[in-house]
Structure formats: structure tokens, C-alpha cells
Image (cartoon, rainbow, N blue to C red):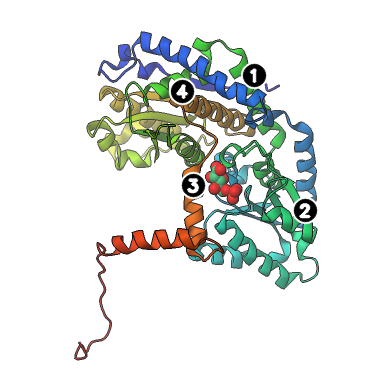
Amino acid sequence: MSKGMHLSFDFSLVLESNLKSGDGMSSAAMKAGIRRARTAAKVTEARHTAGQVGFPDLPFKLEEAKAIGRMAAALRKKYSHMLVLGIGGSALGTKAIIEGIGAGARKGMAVHVADNVDPDFFFPLLRSLPMEKTVVVAISKSGTTAETNSQLALAMDALKKVNPKGWRDQLVLITDPKTGVFRKLATDDGIAALSVPPNVGGRFSVLTPVGLLPLAAAGFSIDRLLDGAAWMEAMFRGVPGDDNPVIKAAAVYAHYMVENPKSVQLWFTYGQGLDRVAEWWQQLWGESLGKKRPGGVSVGQTPARAVGVTDQHSQVQLFQDGPADKVYTFVKWMEGREKGKVPKATFSPDMAMLGNRPLRDLFEAEFQGTIGALWDAGRPIVRLEVGERDERHLGAFLHFWMWVTAIVGDILGVDAFDQPGVEKGKKISRALMGEKGTEAVRTAFDRKSAKRMRDEIHLEERESGNDDSE
Ligand code: PA5
């Protein structure tokens, strides 16, 4: 079990006694919220016991992690680069951990996560890689994601060019253990394949081979990642309601979705790499909770992000004086890495207080100052601080958010683990590309968009200097 963990969860600035704006929670609301969260958590707990929800088990799959570690070590001996193909839950967790901790902080393969099919992004990336020294890891739980399929086809072509006979050895597929085209490809072509547990959905899958293989290849300690998540699982199971950060966070965020609805939760991140963690959370929060309840009522909260200090100079004005439609989550590394000082400068006497002090003092002051300004404006604020930029802390932090999301889903009365809207979008895209048997989807979409086209304005300047033909 993990030692030396330090995470801080501060809910004091959602309390009305501290906010005094009418937008805070009374102590009675907090107590009731905690009771409700405790009761609601039983829904996910029961689904976990029944084997329908698998993410709580992931921190304890140590044998599987060892095997993945061995596979990554073997790949590292042979290849210098790994190209990860995948999107959404098949990509964002890996990016969050690599950039959260910092790719340069560990020694391993150069891992590139390609989570976009924009040709202006993907082709240059593919051309930049030394394919003979690159292993391609294609990740799709369903195997039906058009983006990942097209990337895989392109990457396979590139591999075949440099290694016509042995290209299969340079490929790993991560997919559902039974269904899906990737599984068939693995079986038919004898390509190495790892499984995503059927009871773990994309955005909850960073601690499965989806995240573990690329992270181990990049030199990150997947043991410590799992250890941190196990620590959080134990906290959640063992600590009583009032002091349980998961339950308390679920109580607070549910309050700002049910009793005092805020349409936006904004993460203001202070610390290198945390914006990628925010991106992972955005998918988790948005896709898990933005749903229609049985009966058709829509629920959810738009997850938004801002980067400190950069966005202080672009968005804080709005946050302070604009609509009171947000709950704010400030997320920060407790201590950063760099200790450098600002030299004493004579060119700016008014700024003399900066001289000979760590630049971090200014960063801290900006963090405190922004919170102070929003507090002064009566905005509800949660403050979360993560002790270290390492695997244990991020493992714990991500696991914390998975539980909070699941419980808020239980409170809202939606299934946090499905994504019917995403599936619908995927279906339309595939139909537009001409997938067999989807004529009806295509026709319905064409009819709707034909109507929309009539409202479009196109601005176009013709290049010809001679307009006589008109
Ligand atoms: O969380 C989810 O389930 C989705 O965001 C998926 O991760 C995403 O759509 C990619 O799906 P797949 O892994 O099946 O290609």
C-alpha cells in the first residue's frame, strides 16, 4: 500500500458561511448531500458486486500489470517509438498521465498518441516516425470506431513498406476480448492482442492495457499508478462520510447540479501538464453525466477548462462579473519541480518585490489571488491539490474522479457507464462514409442537413481578375 501520499480536498469555499453570496451550501445542505451520496454510492457498489461495473477492480490486477510490464520491456528493447492509435477513452488517460507527470521525467520510448484523424495532423505525424523502429498500438474497445480503423489501415501500410514480411510483429491490438473487428484481425493474422475488460468502458479504462501498455513503454511505473488507485479505493471504502473526499465531492457537485444547478463546472488548473488531466476529466464528466434520464429529462453539466495563470488574463473577468452559472474546481500540484529565483532587476522599481524570490512564489500568489477574486465575487469553489507529479498521486487522483462521477450519476439517476450519444455520432459518420446497410441513416441525415444548408452563408472571393463571363 502506498506511503507518502498527499492529496488535499478543500470544500470550505462552497459553504455559505464563507461565501455569503446566496450561492453557497448551508451546513444542513452539506449534511443532507453527504447522506444522499452515501446512499447513491450503493447503486454503483451493487453493480460492481454483480460484475457489471469493473473499474474498482483495476488497481488490484497486479499479475496482469506484471505481464504488461514484461511486454513493454520487450518492446522497448526492439523499438524507439510507439504510435498509439485511439480516441476518447482509448487515448485521453494515457495523455493525461504522460503529460501530467511529464514525458521527460521518465526514460522510455517516445510515445505518440494520435487521437485525431485531421489529415494535417495525422499524415505529418506518420511521416515523422522512423517506421522500422516504431511499434503501432491500435486501441478500440468496440473496434467499430471509424477514426481508429482508418488510422490503423494507414499505419499498417506504412509498416508493410518498411517490413513487408514481419510487419505483424510491429503491431499490438487492444480491444474487447471477444467481439469486434480488431479481435478478428488479431486472430486471423496472428497479431498480438490485449483485452479491455468488457465491464470497463473507454473513459474508465486508463488502468487497463489501454493506458498501462503505452505508459509502461514510456517508462512510467504502472505498479505505482495502480498502487495510488488502490490507496484511493481503500480511502473510499474505509473513511466515514464526513471525511470521505469521494463522498463529500459527490455531495458538493451533485448539489450544484440538482439543488442549485450550475450549467458549467470549470477546472482552473495551476501546474504543468494538468490541462491534459483536465481534458481526461472533461470526457469523464461530460460523457458519463450528460444524459437523458428515463422519462426524457436532460441532465448534465458542461465541463470546461482554464489554465492558470494564462487564462487569468482572458477569462477571469467573465468568471468574476459574468453569469453565476459555474462551479469552480481549482486543481494544482502542491509543489512544483522548479525552484528557480527571479533576479533582482533595477529596470522596474515598482516590481522590486519580485527580486531574489522563487518564481513559484508569484505562481502561488496568482493561484491564491484568483481564488480570492472569485471568492470575493461569491462564486462556489472547490480546491484540490495533488502532492507530487508522480504515478501514485495521479493514480489516486484519477480513481477519485471515477468514483465521484459514478456516484453523481447515481444521484442524477443516469447510467454513468454508457454513451448513447457518442454511439449515435459514430453511426452517422460511418453511414456518411458509405457503410453497408446504413442507407436509412444516411437518407435521414441528408434530409435534415439539406434543410440546414439553406441557412448557410458562403463567402468566396474568385481569383480571376476578369469577370466578363458572369
Ligand atoms: O468512453 C467511451 O466509451 C468513448 O469515449 C470511447 O472511448 C471512444 O468513443 C472510443 O471508442 P473505442 O475504444 O470503442 O474505439
> In this picture, is 433 found above or below 206?
below
Q: Can residue 104 be seen in this snapshot?
A: yes
Which amino acid lies under the numbered mark 4 shown in the image of this protein? Ile
User: Which x, y percent locates residue 327?
Assistant: 35, 28
Q: Which residue is mark 2?
A: 192
Disc 3 secondary structure class: helix
Disc 2 secondary structure class: strand
Which amino acid lies under the numbered mark 3 shown in the image of this protein? Val
Which amino acid lies under the numbered mark 2 shown in the image of this protein? Ala
Q: In screen coordinates, is 280 left or right of 53?
A: left
Dot 2 alpha-carbon crowd within 10 angstroms: few under 14, some 14 to 19, many 20 or more: some
Dot 1 alpha-carbon crowd within 10 angstroms: few under 14, some 14 to 19, many 20 or more: few
Which of marks 2 and 1 precedes in the sequence? 2
Looking at mark 1, is its residue's CB closer than 8 Å to ligand 1? no
Q: Which residue is mark 1?
A: 234
Looking at mark 3, is its residue's CB closer than 8 Å to ligand 1? yes
Mark 1–mark 2 contact, CB under 8 Å?
no
- Measure how far apart labels 3 and 2 are at the Cα level: 28 Å
Q: Residue at x 62, y 39 (%)?
A: 206
Q: Which residue is mark 3?
A: 422
| Label tally | 4
Disc 4 secondary structure class: helix
Q: In screen coordinates, is 134 left or right of 469?
A: right
Which of marks 1 and 4 precedes in the sequence? 1
Which of marks 3 and 4 precedes in the sequence? 4
> In this picture, is 257 found above or below 162?
above
Q: Which residue is mark 4?
A: 411
- Measure how far apart labels 3 and 1 are at the Cα level: 32 Å
- Measure how far apart labels 4 and 3 are at the Cα level: 22 Å
Which of marks 2 and 3 precedes in the sequence? 2
Between circles 4 and 1, the one closer to the viewer is: 4
